[in-house]
Amino acid sequence: MDTEKGPLGRSAAVEYASWFKALADPTRVQIVSLLARQGRPMNVGEIVEAVDVGQSTVSAHLKVLAEVRFVLADSRGTARYYRINDACVGCFPSAADVVMGRPAPRAPTCGEPMGDTS
């Protein structure tokens, strides 16, 4: 089978689907946007205040975002601070290109699936 005409490889498809799913919620998009625009680690309280959603909801969304490595968490005493993972977020547009059958615009820096098209 011509791999350029065939579907994306299964492992890459699974990885990319998890990325798209993670951003399929408006609050998670707001959180990613906030962390990227602030350019600094933020605690849950700061994020709650900015997105105007309850603490437990924000914590659940941060867990989803951390699972796909869009955000990273650092502990400082009893608090956790979240920051954007620039490397993985930078791969997201490339993932969309690959899924649509276009070549990736640059070499990925966030994981194996980008090269797995078989």
Image: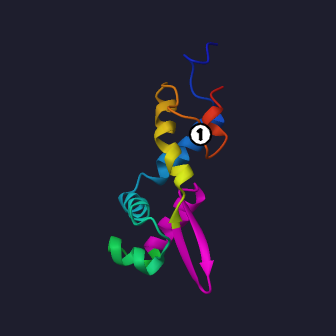
Q: Of all residues shown, which one is farthest toward the top?
A: 1
Q: Is residue 27 above or below residue 20?
A: below
Q: Which residues are magenta?
A: 57-82
What is the total number of numbered labels drawn onto the structure image?
1
Residue 102's place in the image compared with 80, above or below, is above
Residue 78, percent across and down?
A: 60, 86
Amino acid type at image mark 1 = Pro
Which residue was labeled with disc 1?
108
Residue 79 is covered by the magenta coloring = yes
As drawn, is 92 to the left or to the right of 114? left
Quarter-of-image position of residue 73 = bottom right
The spot of residue 90 in percent (x, y) is: 50, 47
Q: Is residue 115 left or right of residue 5?
A: right
Coordinates of residue 18 in the picture (x, y in percent): 55, 48
* Residue 59 position within the rendered picture, expressed as x and y whole percent measured from the top left: 49, 73
Query: Is residue 16 or residue 85 the one in the foreground?
Result: 85
Question: Which type of secondary structure does the marked residue at label 1 adopt?
Answer: loop
Q: Residue at x 62, y 86 (%)?
A: 77
Q: Name the residue rendered at 50%, 71% in the picture.
A: 41
Q: Residues within 10 Å of mark 1 (few under 14, many from 20)?
A: some
Quadrant (top left, top right, bottom left, bottom right) of the N terminus: top right
Q: Residue 59 vs residue 109: left or right?
A: left
Q: Nearer the viewer, residue 105 or 48?
A: 105
Residue plotted at (41% across, 74% down): 47
Q: Is residue 93 magenta?
A: no
- Residue at x 47%, y 46% (from the top left corner): 20
Q: Quadrant of the C terminus?
A: top right
52 vs 90, left or right, is: left
- What kind of colouring is applied to the model shown? rainbow
